[in-house]
Image (cartoon, rainbow, N blue to C red):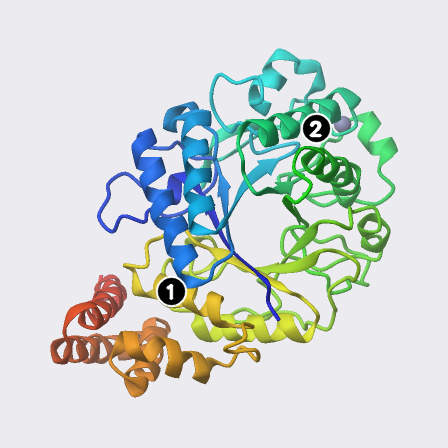
């Protein structure tokens, strides 16, 4: 069974009011273009919807920023999450991505820590300080800490304890960094295994103490450890980066991960729609759980708001068959966008008591049909939505969606109107 369902978000992309200006479609480390009220409103809508529909938790990157109310706004969201019965998990970069306090005049902002202590910076192979700045999707520079410096580990643990003591989040999703590693002499001598843009040795060094620090304040906190990887063995001698499999050295590092935590994996290349590699590996035993996360229905790897309930069914089936008990997908956009709505509802349904086999037909008949005007229309909705990959059929598909909308009323009509608009965008672009 799936017992942990998460929606994963960056604050600057989260839009749960259907009509709202100034929100990014995708990306990381962007500015937040709103007020504290905007932040609290958008996430309150998200958390309450999750509570009503069977989603267990929401991961928030950028939870703490001066620009949207800092600690006070985060506390308000924790109250909303408590009332909704949903876990609010802070996304925390331990050596990158801003640390506990993403942006502002806080000592718990990793950027501030490294500005104050430039000698604790991670460095690149050329000796330059490692400051990541990705034009396009991640424009705000973020500073990387050297994981070998004990001062940085101590700072990291202090910041996690401060977070748990100050804001009553239900846990954290932590990451060690996937945007290149520190290449100083200490790090090179410490690491026992080769690196890519990420390092399993760095994860093994930080994740145990981090989980302990969180648990020392809140013993029942949910701790999710990002691996950026799939557990499928890689035996050709390569060391994959984000989304790749696991070289032999992973077992030794994983053995150092704290057992009380969930380990989070990346499914993107091992399931539909890409499925560029076979998936035979089982989830490692002994942890609180193993979560499969996929970039479905996001502009990161594909198309924003895309209807992905069939691919998600396959992901859930593969996850269940291989011993995983958690699933995570992006949750930044409002269910007003019917693609998102169906994906979120499918996430809630697959692997539940109502649908233990994560069966697509069962979902379409029980869950989607009442929303779309009946079981035949539910199957038709998925078929037409998939035609964004078939330019020659788009015009007919959009017309068909408009006909269904005209035959229905209320939200079911609205959902078909969304599909007609969604398909029309691709048609419009294809026609130049
Ligand atoms: Zn270093």
Mark 2–mark 1 CB contact (< 8 Å): no
Residue 306's label in the rendered image is 1
- Of residue 96 and residue 328, the one placed in the foreground of this image is 328
If the image is split into quadrants, where does the N terminus sit?
Answer: bottom right
Q: Residue furthest top?
A: 116
Measuring from the top left, give residue 158's x and y in whole percent: 68, 24
Measuring from the top left, give residue 352's x and y in whole percent: 54, 72
Rendered view: 408 above or below 164? below
Q: Which residue is mark 2?
A: 157
Q: Please tell me in which quadrant of the rendered image residue 218 appears.
A: top right
Label 1 sits on a secondary structure element that is loop
Rendered view: 327 above or below 65? below
Residue 111's label in the rendered image is none
The answer to whether residue 30 is left or right of residue 34 is: right
Mark in front: 2 vs 1? 2
Label 2 sits on a secondary structure element that is helix
Measuring from the top left, give residue 353's x and y in whole percent: 54, 75
Identify the residue at horizontal 63%, vertical 56% (top origin).
243
Identify the residue at horizontal 58%, vertical 22% (top origin).
108
- Of residue 357 and residue 243, the one placed in the foreground of this image is 357
Q: Tell me if residue 304 can be seen.
A: yes
Measuring from the top left, give residue 47's x and y in whole percent: 41, 49
Q: Tell me if residue 392 can be seen.
A: no
Please tell me how crowded label 1 is: few (under 14), some (14-19), or many (20+) other residues with Cα within 10 Å.
many
């Amino acid at each position: 069974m799936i017992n942990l369902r998460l929606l994963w978000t960056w604050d600057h992309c989260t839009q749960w009011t259907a009509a709202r200006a100034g929100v990014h479609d995708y990306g990381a480390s962007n500015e937040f273009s709103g007020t504290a009220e905007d932040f609290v409103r958008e996430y309150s809508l998200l958390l309450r919807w999750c509570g009503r529909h069977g989603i267990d938790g929401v991961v928030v990157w950028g939870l703490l920023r001066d620009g949207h109310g800092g600690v006070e706004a985060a506390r308000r969201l924790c109250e909303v999450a408590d009332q909704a019965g949903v876990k609010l998990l802070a996304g925390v970069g331990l050596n990158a991505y801003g640390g506990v306090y993403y942006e502002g005049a806080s000592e718990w902002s990793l950027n501030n820590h490294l500005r104050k202590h430039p000698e604790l910076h991670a460095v690149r192979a050329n000796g330059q300080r490692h400051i990541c700045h990705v034009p396009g999707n991640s424009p705000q520079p973020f500073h990387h800490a050297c994981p070998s410096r004990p001062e940085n580990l101590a700072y990291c643990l202090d910041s996690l304890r401060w977070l748990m003591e100050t804001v009553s989040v239900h846990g954290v999703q932590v990451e060690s960094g996937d945007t290149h590693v520190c290449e100083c002499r200490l790090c090179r001598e410490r690491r026992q295994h080769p690196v890519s843009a990420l390092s399993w040795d760095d994860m093994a060094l930080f994740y145990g103490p981090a989980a302990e620090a969180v648990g020392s304040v809140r013993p029942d906190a949910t701790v999710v450890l990002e691996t950026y990887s799939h557990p499928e063995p890689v035996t050709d001698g390569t060391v994959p980066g984000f989304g790749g499999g696991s070289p032999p050295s992973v077992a030794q590092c994983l053995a150092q991960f704290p057992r009380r935590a969930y380990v989070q994996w990346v499914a993107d290349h091992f399931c539909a729609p890409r499925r560029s590699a076979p998936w035979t590996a089982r989830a490692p035993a002994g942890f609180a759980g193993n979560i499969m996360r996929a970039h479905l229905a996001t502009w990161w790897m594909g198309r924003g708001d895309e209807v992905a309930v069939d691919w998600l069914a396959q992901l859930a089936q593969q996850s269940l068959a291989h011993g995983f008990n958690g699933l995570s997908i992006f949750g930044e956009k409002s269910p007003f966008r019917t693609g998102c709505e169906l994906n979120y509802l499918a996430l809630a349904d697959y692997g539940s008591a109502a649908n233990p086999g994560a069966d697509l037909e069962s979902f379409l008949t029980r869950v989607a049909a009442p929303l779309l005007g009946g079981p035949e229309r539910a199957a038709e909705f998925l078929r037409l939505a998939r035609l964004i990959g078939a330019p020659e059929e788009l015009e007919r598909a959009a017309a068909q969606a408009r006909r269904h909308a005209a035959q229905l009323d209320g939200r079911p009509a609205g959902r078909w109107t969304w599909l007609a608009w969604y398909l029309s965008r691709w048609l419009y672009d294809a026609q130049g």
